[in-house]
Amino acid sequence: MSEAAVRESGTQLGWSATGQSVNLDRRADIDAKHERVSKWLQEQGWEGLLLLEPANVAWFTSGATSRGLCPEGEQPALLITPTQRWLLASNAEAQRLFDEELDGLGFMLKEWQWDWRRDYLLRSLAQAKRLACDRAYLDLPSAAEWLAERRRCLTPYEQACCKQLAEVVVHAVEAACRNFQPRESERELAGQVAHRLLRRGAWPVHISVIADGRSQRYRRHGFTAMPIERWCVVSATARKYGLHVSVCRTVSFGPPEPSVREAHANACKILAALTAASWPDAIVREVFQAARRIYDLVGAEHEWHAAPIGHLMGREAIELVIYPDSDTVMQVGWTLFWSPCVGPALMGDTVVVTTQGPQILTTVEAWPIVLVRVSGMQVQLPGILER
């Protein structure tokens, strides 16, 4: 098989003009990322950058993702040079990617026939150019850390996409909680959440429904056939636009038990402290210490040992876990999922770090609210829905 066997298309609109309007904000976001990559390549003396990780492909394309079942070694990839950006895809997927994802966004195509395998194309490119790569491949220099640092700071366009996704996730969880019936199983409620997500174009990455206090025993959970008798905690993580958002809500049939109400109120205080501390240049270790002080004040000083209290998310569902000894500095554009537990209570909201301070993306749609004042800031959080 020769180099000529790899078909190339040089038009910026890909193969076909589908008649779909081009999202100019997305095009500008991609152009800005290309400019940053081009400058970095020139500084390093490299001719191009290979992106093989799906998260990095989604980042550079501002949302393009592979669909269908595809082996890891055959996933679509990107080649970025200082002046061009190329999609590398098999003939089984290239047409859909251009028609649905990349038309009009300045990408060109290097295609391989599916039975020839992606590796041949990658090796031929690596032999012809001085390339860096986002994962260990051949002996190419690594760009993984440089890309991870930039991928984690969402651009204004990406933040707007996250806000739209947050509305979808909040609606799916809250609407399902308002409509399920007593003694339906955890998995039946999880199915209702997933159905609502899929109807609005969001992919359910993880759904958890845990009933009647089992959350105190199992801090990481999914759903079972157990019927929901009195109350439950519902959480969901979904992906759309190549981004992730998570949310958590608590619903009760009738007034919750006093112990549940107290635990939920204490978890609200901790979530409010974490949210209020999510400013640019805040040190993760110090934010964690502020949360531990609230744990101590509410008599739950050991609870934070039970499970992580938050993580950074974005193109990956978990970009970075928040550890108590981390000296990492929060950056503008970080999107955090804070999820403290106290006893059977679990809270969870997605928060973006902005120059004006923390902004909760997963604000309630039609749900009771709890107002908590901390550090001079009034934080609005979800209460317990009583049905």
Image (cartoon, rainbow, N blue to C red):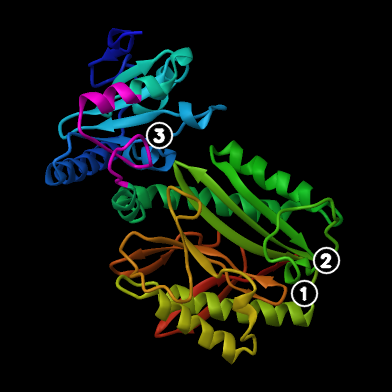
Question: Vertically, is 82 above or below 361?
Answer: above
- The residue most toward the front is 139
Residue type indicated by callout 3:
Ala
> Which residue is rendered at x = 34% and y = 42% of the image?
134
- Residue 295 in view (yes/no): yes
Query: Do tag 2 and tag 3 residues touch (Cβ < 8 Å)?
Result: no
Whichever of labels 2 and 3 marks the residue nearer the N terminus, that label is 3
Whichever of labels 1 and 3 marks the residue nearer the N terminus, that label is 3
Where's residue 165, x and y in %?
Answer: 48, 48
Q: Nearer the viewer, residue 204 or 317?
A: 317
Query: Do tag 1 and tag 3 residues touch (Cβ < 8 Å)?
Result: no
- Residue 18 in view (yes/no): no
Residue type indicated by callout 2:
Arg
The number of discs equals 3
SS for callout 1: loop
Question: Vertically, is 90 above or below 163?
Answer: above
Q: Kindly report the distance in space between the C-alpha atoms of the residues bearing marks 1 and 3.
A: 44 Å
Q: Is residue 379 magenta?
A: no
Residue 308 vs residue 133: left or right?
right
Q: Which residue is mark 3?
A: 64
Q: Which mark is residue 256?
A: 1
Query: Do tag 1 and tag 2 residues touch (Cβ < 8 Å)?
Result: yes
> Which residue is rendered at x = 65% and y = 51% of the image?
207
What segment is highlighted magenta in the picture? 122-143
Q: Kindly report the distance in space between the C-alpha atoms of the residues bearing marks 1 and 2.
A: 8 Å
